[in-house]
Amino acid sequence: MDVNKDFLDQLAIGFERCGFPWQDVFGSRKKIGFGVSGGADSMALLYSSILLRGRSFKTNGADFVVVSINHNIRSKEESLGDCLFVRDFCERFPGIDFILADLGLGKVEQEAQLRGRGIEEAARFLRY
């Protein structure tokens, strides 16, 4: 049994069940956006989507646009490091554009105070 093939088949089924017509979208010349933090979940979804696109559409598949956000709420090395990890990963594959969005030092904390909410909620609000 080809585990990779089985996994990609299950991913395709999952996309369909969520109402995402992956064959139409991945096979088009459209651009598909991915928000990628560098964490296991978002990296797994991105990599699996790259594999599925490559398996199904050797040429002329959709381009991917990956956005990673530096919230600047951890140390500079950690926060920027995650974004650069995602950038370096994306550079290994054709048909992927990378965008780094930097919220600026103190922006999330300022938004949290303005909204009277916590840091995580403010980061989510700004990210969306």
Image (spheres, rainbow, N blue to C red):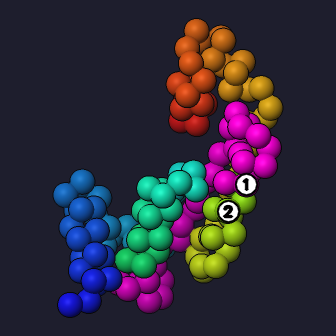
Are the residues flagged by discs 2 and 1 in contact, CB closer than 8 Å?
A: yes
Q: CA distance from mark 2 to mark 1?
A: 6 Å
54 above or below 85? below
Q: Position of residue 86 (x, y in %)?
A: 63, 62
Number of other residues with Cα within 10 Å of mark 2, as a class: few under 14, some 14 to 19, many 20 or more: few
Q: Is residue 77 above or below residue 1?
A: above
Please report the residue visible at 58 percent of the width from the left and 9 percent of the height from the top. 116
Residue 73 is covered by the magenta coloring: yes
Q: Tell me where residue 44 sits by quadrant.
A: bottom left
Which residue: 28% across, 68% down? 11
Q: Can residue 120 be seen at all in this image of the molecule?
A: yes
Image spot of residue 2 (x, y percent): 26, 89
Which residue is the site of mark 2?
85
Observer able to see residue 32: no
Q: Quadrant of the N terminus?
A: bottom left
Label 2 secondary element: helix
Residue beneath disc 1 = 81
Q: Secondary structure at mark 1?
A: helix
Mark 1 is surrounded, within 10 Å at the Cα level, by few (under 14), some (14 to 19) or many (20 or more) other residues, namely some
Left or right position of 24 against 84: left
The residue type indicated by label 2 comes to: Phe
Q: Amino acid at mark 1?
A: Gly
Counting from the top left corner in percent of width and height, residue 58 is at 44, 89
Residue at x-position 65% and y-position 11%: 114
Residue depicted at 67% across the width and 74% down the height? 91
Pick whichever, 22 or 88, lies toward us: 88
- Which disc is residue 18 wearing? none
Percent across and percent down for residue 7 are 28, 75
Q: Which residues are magenta?
A: 54-82
Residue 77 in magenta?
A: yes
